[in-house]
Image: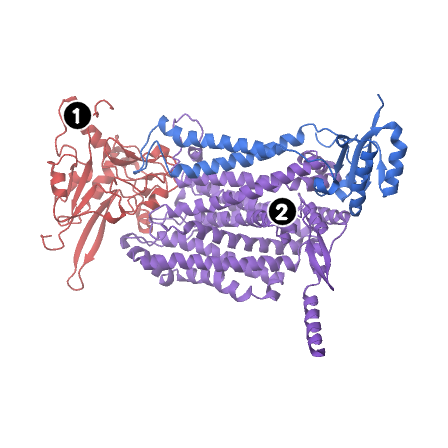
Amino acid sequence: MAAETKLFGKLKTTEQEHKDPKEQLMFDPRPREELNRMVMEMMTTTTRKFWLWAIGLGAGVVVLLFGAWGYMISTGMWVTGLRRPIYWGVFIVTFVFWIGISHAGTFVSAILRVFKSEFRRPFTRAAELMTTFGLAAGALYPLIHLGRVWVFYFMVPYPNARWLWPNFRSPLVWDLLAITTYLLSSTIYLYLPLVPDLAMARDRTTGIRHSAYKILALGWRGTEAEWFRLKKAIQIFAFAIIPVMFSVHTIVSWDFAVSQVAGWHSTIFGPYFIIGAILSGVSAVVTILYVLRSTLKHMDYFLRPEHFDALGKLILVFSMAWAYFFFNDYLLGWYGGEAAVRQILTAHATGPAAWVWYTMLICNIVIPWLTLWNRKIRRTPWLMFIITLLINVGMYLERYTIIPLTLGHQRTPFDWGIYTPRPIEISIVLGTFCLFTFLYLVMSRLIPLVPVWEVQEGQVAHTLRKVGKAEVPSVTELD
Amino acid sequence: MYTKVVHMALFKEEQLDHAAESITRLRSLGISDKDISVISGIPFSEKILDRPMNWTNVGRIGVAGAVLGFITALLLNFGTPFLYPLRVADMPIFFPIPTSIVVTFELVMLGLLISTFIGVFVETISPSYGPQGYHPKVSDGHIAILFSGPMDLDQQFHSTFAELGATLEHDVEEEKLWL
Amino acid sequence: MAEVSKGIAEKWGLVVDQDRCTGCNACVVACSMENNVPFTGEDNVAFGRGTYWIYNKRMWEGAYPEVAPAFQPVMCQQCGSAPCEPVCPTFAAVHSEEEQINLQIYNRCIGTRYCANNCPYHARQFNFQDPDIPEPMNSYLNPDVTIRRRGVMEKCTFCVQRIVAGRQTASAEDRPLRDGEVTPACVAACPSGALVFGDLSDPSSRVSQMAQNERQYKLMDELGTRPKVTYLKGGGRNGG
């Protein structure tokens, strides 16, 4: 009897060591004044390093993106590495990559909100911001890759002097509509929960910042009617933006799947792309959270190992789901016996660019599966930073395999080809990475990056409840 | 007619129970619900504060936008081919099913989401009823009970709120919060 | 135009007799001259950006030392259900109801290059740069065909300008089009008679007769694109 008690006693202490409630943001509450002060300081503190980065990235946007793009427009597409039969190269690869990245904002913010996952609270806005800027960077590519970008408006449906409306059967027109819908709605979805925090910033600033926040906060006071309306609108958005997000990446996958290119024409491409997008997007959230945590003042209070832990679990699940879809796509293509598809699969694994394929598998499957099951690794932010960065390398290479490597290996061996991106293309791709980082960097000092009211709401809702002799963390549903 | 004066009682965030209690007391002093409004830094449901149900048109405006999006999609899918019929591959020209479903879905969602936002925007900037006023402490987590009551009850208000541990503020209506 | 063509159900088609093809590439040259196809220069051709509306696939048949060259001239197959058409967002690739061929409208093209990816025959060409036509060469340009600027797709049209001219002549003389009256540049240039062009809707035309040949096959027929180009190849049994 005594031994048994001892055993139980020991178990209990280890349990308690692991689950010190103070480790969790929700059980480490601070008064609202304190939270506000921290967020305001986070927003207004700029170091020399910040300015150097901002200037460097800004120059990167001007030179690498707009300079190179302008040069390409003025001379023609011959500066790219595209050639027959590979008509889509890294521009489309990076387009799919950015659209994929943009999925996590919605995933983290909307899906976790709908399912009331409490760990989302401190970083919903960081994820939503990533969605908006990821889309802004990605939406440039359908323009960049056009042969005649100066007549891009031929695609836009509006009554025009040409008497011609776009072809609504084309997946590219669907892309245009879906990306427009997603960009507008994700920007609004970023803005709505921001309004109370803008009001908070309005009350604590002077001068030009004050005037700007005053306009943006729309005269927010926090009355019952305002909260009710806001909650209602956020609820509509959280539910409605999820199918929009699914449709966006499905349509991106349909750009490939509706064609009859061998290796593209697959009925599983829709869900396969969505899973890939969420995998790369959630990974990018972790990457960004690590950067935010190590560069922004007070961010280590809001972002804790528990968040990396929870996101790490999600990434592991999505890595497994990705592997499942990848294998499904591979196996059925191989089994189907169409010679062209089999040749492509063989070429991916043994061709001159086989390293792309193997790196993809290592980054997307081997690395997350070997590391993310471990709680310690998941709770070490810098390790998570490296792992998630590698996953995104893998996801980029996945798109690279699907686009140029598949196009170069179609049904007639006479028309096979190899594609190598040229400096202008690489410059533009790097330019959009600069654009994304630049916008994020600037925005991190302009808006409260932590949704203070949501964090406080969470902290009010979380209590330690006494059950028997133990204090158990519990959540109260305030609405 | 007596003159009504707007008071604001500020409760600290941990005094939520007192704030709820104060509303009950105000009612017993004869202040009706429409002369009270609560402003707070985080949302509290009506039940917590024992307040009348709120009401918003945002959902309805959103649905109206979705319908508008649906009509636009119908016109684009089934109307524009009549202006300039062009055949592509074997696809139907005038009844582009199933491709029209994609366009319809996107435009319905676009209509729904944009108009939900427009609904929020319009309702936010339209004049609201009930006592006006604001205090920056609200975004610091304080719960403010705004109420307008007759001058002659002033003494009782002060004693009630002092008892509940709140501070009373006057002249809170001055600040202009938007444009 | 519309009145002239009323009641005419044309269905232009081409037969390529691979057993007769000598691989001389005269069709490629004639096509380039007729259609103002830009010369992109040696380097671009070597890089894979040579623009050809018709190109000759050179292959070797048999095992060493018993090898023989085989030629397969490939041009746009003018599919009845063309994969390139529906994917174009701006209706630049459309089906011509009148000639039952597949047309590229250069002015509408914005250069998404989607059609080129989706063409299983790789028959579509992209203008990576503006055409560079040196001084005396500009007098050779065909005034019936527009010059394409950079950023647009182009491809074989079955010399639609010749089809229209032939139809207009016939209509002016108030008679139906005769078989063999319209010949695209490649057909006119072919010295061995490997290319035959005509109206497939007329069962007595030469092209219809040849398309019934037992040696006939279509390129990637299994994709369901319904090409208008028929290839003849006997596999050594019927000559060639």
The secondary element bearing badge 1 is classed as: helix
Relative placement, left or right, of A277 versus C151 is right
Instruction: Identify the chain drawn in purple.
Output: A
- Please provide percent x and percent y for residue A153: 44, 33
Q: Which residue is mark 2?
A: A125
Toward which corner of the image does residue A315 lie, by quadrant? bottom right
Colour in which the image shows chain C: red
Toward which corner of the image does residue A258 lie, by quadrant? top left
Nearer-the-camera pick, A216 or A433:
A216
Label 1 is placed on what type of residue?
A: Thr
- Vertical comparison of A208 with A352: above or below: above
Q: Are marks 1 and 2 on the same chain?
A: no
**Colour scheme employed for the rendering of this structure:** by chain
- The answer to whether one can see residue A135 in this image is yes
Which numbered disc, 1 or 2, marks the residue closer to the eye? 2
- Please provide percent x and percent y for residue A384: 58, 61
- Please provide percent x and percent y for residue B5: 83, 28
Colour in which the image shows chain B: blue
Mark 1 → mark 2, Cα distance in angstroms: 70 Å
- Vertical comparison of B110 with C4: above or below: below
The C terminus of chain A sits in image quarter: top right
Q: Please rate how many residues cluster around mark 1, counting C-alpha atoms within 10 Å: few if below 14, some from 14 to 19, many from 20.
A: few
Label 2 is placed on what type of residue?
A: Arg
The secondary element bearing badge 2 is classed as: helix
Q: Which residue is mark 1?
A: C169
